[in-house]
Image (tube, helix red, strand yellow):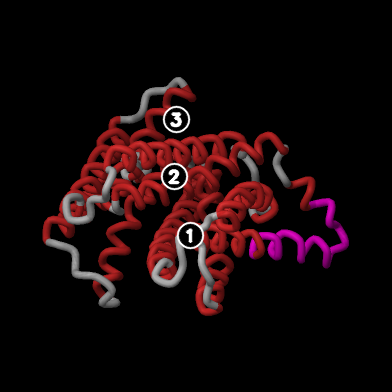
Amino acid sequence: MSRRPAVLLRRTLAGSRLGLQSVLLTALLATTWLIVGTSLKTADAATVSAGRTGFTVIGLAALAWVPALRSGAPETVRQTSPPLTRTTLLGLTGVTAYTVLSTVAIALAGPALPSLVVSLTPAVVLIADCLLRRARPSGRALLGTGVAVAGAVLYVLPRLTSTAGHNMLLGAVAASGAMVSMAFYGLYFATVNRGYRGPMAPRILPIFTVGAIPLVIWAATDPAVGDVRWSTVALLAVLGTVIYVPAYLLQHKILVSAGASYAALLGLAVAPVVGISSAILRLADPPAPVQLAATAVTLTGMLVALARPSH
């Protein structure tokens, strides 16, 4: 009986830490949207995609190698790295495929339709996770995920007709590919790293290095790429090293500690935060009343799905 208060305390502290990480991750991801939107005003999509990923690799490399070199144990970085086959698969799906397909989807169909498709990711991840584990999802998880996804869809719908692109069908196909790529990445990374407790930077550095190579080739060979301003390079450097690095470290820690379904649900909170932040910063019109209501629905569903039983 004496151990029960200690166990409850550890669970409470772990839950508080996860909650704080979740809030911080949502804020960081929302910040990336705002900065990417600003950088796209002075550079093309290929340059922004390659630049932000390249600087992310530089930041992760610094975090992985500098401490190892200072301690005189560089082999620890190589020992922490995942196998080459796994690294390549994760890099090409979660980094390359998702970045390229989501960019193409926005170019073909505008931003609203891809957002609508990607908002279905938590439902896809929940179903796939249950199939892989051969387990039935709890009623709480099903209800909460369904409500959260419905709120996310409702948030996007008012913008669907006003931001339509020139090829909605191909845009929907590309967005579906991006959604499946990210769903697979989250599930696969969480599965193969279950129980991992080591440093995360050397764990994901090879993945992002592999994923960045096709993006750099894309930017180098794209005839649409023009001269890049130094101010844009500086902005991408800040985006990759200061924003994306801590965001990806948190995201992958949450994938390992809380699972792919939890991490996917957190992504639904990003779009409303971006919308409200953009309005506060006067970068866009305020969200419509139906979108504010949709945000409340999404957050309610997330709280229901992510809440842990009190016992």
Q: Residue 75 in magenta?
A: yes
Task: Give the number of the mark in front: 2 or 3.
Answer: 2
Q: How many marks?
A: 3
Task: Give the number of the mark in front: 3 or 1.
Answer: 1
Residue shown at 54% from the left, 46% from the top: 96
Question: Which badge, 2 or 3, comes first in the chain's sequence?
Answer: 2
x and y percent of residue 191 in the render?
56, 34
Residue sitting at the far right: 72
Residue shown at 27% from the left, 42% from the top: 168
As drawn, is 142 to the left or to the right of 55? left
Give the magenta-colored segment's residue range. 59-76
The label on residue 129 is 3
Crowdedness near tag 2: few (<14), some (14–19) or many (≥20) residues, C-alpha within 10 Å: many
Crowdedness near tag 1: few (<14), some (14–19) or many (≥20) residues, C-alpha within 10 Å: few
Where does label 1 land, which residue? Answer: 224
Q: Residue 122 in magenta?
A: no
Where does label 2 land, which residue? Answer: 101
Amino acid, disc 3: Asp
Crowdedness near tag 3: few (<14), some (14–19) or many (≥20) residues, C-alpha within 10 Å: many
The secondary structure type at the circle numbered 2 is helix
The secondary structure type at the circle numbered 1 is loop
Amino acid, disc 2: Leu
Residue situated in front as seen by the camera: 90 or 267:
90
Task: State the CA–CA distance, disc 1 to disc 2.
Answer: 17 Å
Residue shown at 76% from the left, 61% from the top: 65
Question: Which badge, 1 or 2, comes first in the chain's sequence?
Answer: 2
Residues at marks 1 and 2 touching, judged by CB atoms closer than 8 Å: no
Task: State the CA–CA distance, disc 2 to disc 3.
Answer: 23 Å
Determine the main secondary structure of the stretch shown in magenta.
helix
Residue sitting at the far top: 134
Q: Relative to 250, does residue 197 appear above or below in the rendering?
A: above
